[in-house]
Structures are given as C-alpha cells and as structure tokens.
Amino acid sequence: MTSYNTVNITRQDEIAPGFYLLSFKSPFLVHQAQPGQFVYLRCDNTYDPLLPRPFSIAMVDGEKNEVAILYQVVGRGTALLAQKKELDRFTVLGPLGRGFTLPPSGRLFRPKGGPKRIEPLESFPPSFLRIAVVAGGVGIAPLFFLLQRLKDLPDLTIEVLIGARSIKQLLLGPEVKSLSPQNKLHLATDDGSYGFHGPVTEILATLLKADKMDLVYACGPEAMLKTVAGLLTKYNVPGEISLEKQMGCGVGACLSCVCKTKGDKENSFLYRRVCKEGPVFPVQEIIWEE
C-alpha cells in the first residue's frame, strides 16, 4: 500500500562530509515499509527542482514511529534537503518498489544436481544460512534496514561488507556493529585509508572462494554490482541486488528507469522498471550492458 503523507523532520545530521542522515515521523511507513523499498520525496516546497527524488529507506524506529533516509549532496535537490531542520515539513510518497526477499519466507535449498535457490519455507525445513551483505557508498542505506530485520532471526551468520573510496565516505560502520552481535563487519577503502585496501568485492570473492556464503544481498554503484553478479555466477550462489537508477515518476508510468533483464524464453530479454518491478532483482535476472 502506497500513500502521500506530509511529515515532520525530527532530526538531521551530517554523518560524514556531504552525507546526511535525515529522520522524520511516519507511523504509516514504519508499519508498511519493507527493506529495499524507497520513498519519493520532494526536497523543497517549490517546483524548482520540479521532480521529487527517490531515497532508500535506511532505518525504521518502531518505538518512535520514525523513518530515516541516508543521502549524499550531489545536486540542487539534495542541497536544498540538507538545509532542512527539525520540525520542517515535506511531502513523501511511499513505500515504493519491490524490496528484498527475507529469509523467513524462504530457506536455502539445493536440488540434486542443480543450482542453489531459495524455496518457500513451508516446502523445505529451515537450514542454517550464511549471509553476506555488500554495500558500496550510500548503498548501505537499504541494507541497513535489511539488517534491522535480520537481527531478530535465528540461525543466521551475517558478514557485512562496506566499501568506500576513502575513510571519509565509510558510512554506518559503528551502527552496523552495534546493531547485532551476529554481524561480522568488514570495511574496505579504495585508497587504503581504512580497513582493507581495495574494492570491497575482493573481500566477497575471498568468502565465496572459501564456500562461506549461502546468500548475498548487495547495493552500490553499478560497477560494483556487476562484479558481485559475476562472482555469484562463478560460485553458484544466489543473491539479490538493489539497483540505483535515475527516476522520473517513481510509480512506473514514465518508463525512464528501465533495466534489461532475462526473459522467459531462452536468449530472450525484456525491460523492467526499476521503480516498480525493482529496485531489488534476483542477481541472475539482470543483463549487464558491456
């Protein structure tokens, strides 16, 4: 269920240079949103900029009835949003899109001679799941909400991999660590200023090579996601990825955010709307452009 709501800002913090965590009251979103979904937010009460902006839901606080988004200032709209203060109001549409498939609705199953896949829980007995959550930059936003939900589930081992260009752009590491003792945190920076020196996907490759992962969730820059997809295909591990695309309407009408995916027939393809059929897709469905 989706609805327009006028909400009040409860807090806004610059958690890293140019990166903001904004919280607002929304009992509706608290009860309706699922990890991986997003909201469409008008950054200012004017028509300049004309279009609202999509933001992944990063955190949900049921006790306070608050929702938080994480964003980077990259243009006029987000620059206006960064000027907002406590008690300021704006209009938000959501929750939108398709979110992540949560383990309670399925467990890992490998049919004899076939690839791993997720099947309905009622069809197969639960099994111990080893999960990797891979984030690049602000891609940690929908994955943090996912981790909030995963922390209450039994029989999970979770490896959280967060990558950034430098230490100044590593986001929500301490929050992930304090969220649950079952989260094993790995940090990587491209310039070596903190943690592993190199792409975060190299850490994922090491875990997959050691056969330590059963399921992978990922969100981040397209180049990172393409590498993740290649690794999961190589090691025959299922996963879901959240795509980042520029959007026009946010509800599937304008077709400005399509991505190429595999069709039902062999060697066929079709275009799907990231805002409607996504932003989360099974990694095996995406056809990556060269």
Image (cartoon, grey):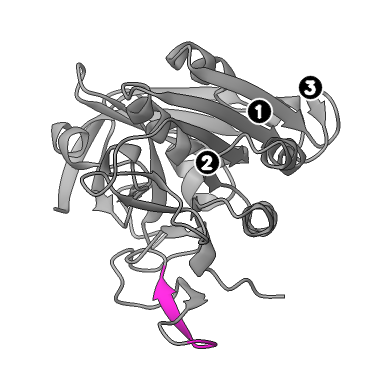
Instruction: Please report contact status of discs 1 and 2: CB closer than 8 Å, yes or no.
Output: no
Q: Residue at x 49, y 45 (%)?
A: 78
Q: Residue at x 51, y 35 (%)?
A: 131
Quarter assignment of residue 210? top right
Is residue 290 visible in the rendered image? The answer is yes
Q: What whole-number distance in Å separates the C-alpha atoms at marks 1 and 2?
A: 26 Å
Q: Nearer the viewer, mark 1 or mark 2?
A: 2
Q: Nearer the viewer, mark 3 or mark 2?
A: 2
Q: Which residue is mark 1?
A: 170
| Mark 3 / mark 2, whichever is N-terminal | 3
Category of crowding for the residue at label 1, using alpha-carbon neighbours closer than 10 angstroms: few (below 14), some (14–19), many (at least 20): many
Q: Secondary structure at mark 2?
A: loop
**Magenta segment main secondary structure:** strand
Q: Secondary structure at mark 1?
A: loop
Magenta-drawn segment: 266-273
Q: Which residue is mark 3?
A: 194
Estimate the x, y position of residue 208 in percent, counting from the top left.
67, 41
Three-letter amino acid code of the residue under disc 1: Leu
Q: Which residue is mark 2?
A: 214
Q: Relative to 205, is 249 on the left or the right? A: left
In this rendering, is residue 290 above or below 170? below
| Mark 1 / mark 2, whichever is N-terminal | 1
